[in-house]
């Protein structure tokens, strides 16, 4: 637990706890509550502004440019399509990702933006997992555009972080949520262990220079710090708290391996 608290305090100092700003626009109060709850469940450190019509949404976005706009179909005063077009062409809002909640995807509007991921159509509102996937894609798009030595990575439950045998390009620190690592043998999966807050994941590929040795999948909504392989050594040198986290992770993995070996011998 000391390690977890130390990691979280250090990440706040680094600014990785920057709030993610959301504007949720719907004429239906129940839908506003629903979308707000889903955002809060999926994303920590979220700041949510609600809008009841298109003009209200634009006003709030101009005052606090959001990372993500979640907009329901059927907005009054300024409809959903017009609102989205204004966001895409507004000089202060061009970086905003848009999630349009619609039972039928509009194949005539925003074709280029759908391809790049700036606009998504959420058609499966009945299952919260689809909403979580849209949120993770919207936020990952924003962090992918930033040229940083490290960035945040978002996963929805059941999303795969990386697969066994893939070439490794990054190492991750878990900031929120739980994941598990497993190996496949035909159709069977053999779980190797759970990865939790404050732990590194994917570090062995950096240490041994080999492809991923296991598949890692999110069990819950997850936020991770992604560190490119080429910058990891320099970052660990400059950030002692992260170096301690790596040592603690390796120690935990070694202890787990030793315990498994002892159990096997005892049998």
Image (cartoon, rainbow, N blue to C red):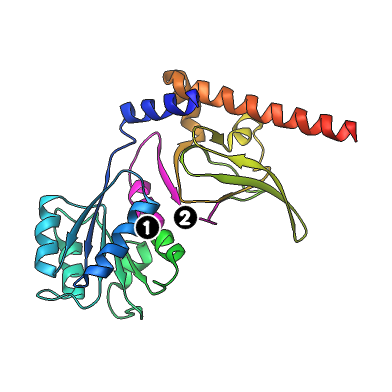
Which residue shows up at 75% across the image and 61% down it? 187
Residue at mark 2:
156
Q: Are marks 2 and 1 in contact (CB under 8 Å)?
A: yes
Q: Residues within 10 Å of mark 1 (few under 14, many from 20)?
A: many
Element class at badge 1: helix
Towards the viewer: 63 or 32: 32
Q: Position of residue 99 (x, y in %)?
A: 31, 65
- The range drawn in magenta is 136-161
Which residue shows up at 20% across the image and 63% down it? 88
For marks 2 and 1, give the CA distance. 8 Å
Q: Position of residue 74 (x, y in %)?
A: 21, 78
Towards the viewer: 217 or 229: 217
Q: Which mark is residue 135?
A: 1
* Quarter of the figure that contains the C terminus: top right
Q: Which mark is residue 104?
A: none
Q: Position of residue 199 (x, y in %)?
A: 53, 33
């Amino acid at each position: 637990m000391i390690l977890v608290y130390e990691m979280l305090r250090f990440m706040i100092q680094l600014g990785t706890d920057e709030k993610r700003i959301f504007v949720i626009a719907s004429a239906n109060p129940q839908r506003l509550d629903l979308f707000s709850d889903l955002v809060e469940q999926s994303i920590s450190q979220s700041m949510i502004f609600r809008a009841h019509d298109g003009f209200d949404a634009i006003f709030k976005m101009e005052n606090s440019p959001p990372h993500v706009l979640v907009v329901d179909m059927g907005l009054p005063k300024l409809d959903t399509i017009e609102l989205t077009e204004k966001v895409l062409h507004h000089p202060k809002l061009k970086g905003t990702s848009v999630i349009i909640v619609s039972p039928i995807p509009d194949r005539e509007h925003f074709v280029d933006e759908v391809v790049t991921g700036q606009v998504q159509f959420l058609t499966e509102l009945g299952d919260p997992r689809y909403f979580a996937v849209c949120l993770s894609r919207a936020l990952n798009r924003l962090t992918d555009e930033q040229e940083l030595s490290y960035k945040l990575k978002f996963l929805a439950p059941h999303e795969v972080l990386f697969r066994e045998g893939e070439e490794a390009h990054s190492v991750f620190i878990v900031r929120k949520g739980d994941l598990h690592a497993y190996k496949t043998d035909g159709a069977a999966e053999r779980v190797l262990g759970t990865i939790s807050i404050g732990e590194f994941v994917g570090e062995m590929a950096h240490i041994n220079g080999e492809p991923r040795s296991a598949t890692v999948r999110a069990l819950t909504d997850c936020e991770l710090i992604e560190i490119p392989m080429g910058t990891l050594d320099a970052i660990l040198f400059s950030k002692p708290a992260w170096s301690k986290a790596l040592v603690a992770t390796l120690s935990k993995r070694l202890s787990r391996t030793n315990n498994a070996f002892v159990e096997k011998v005892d049998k």
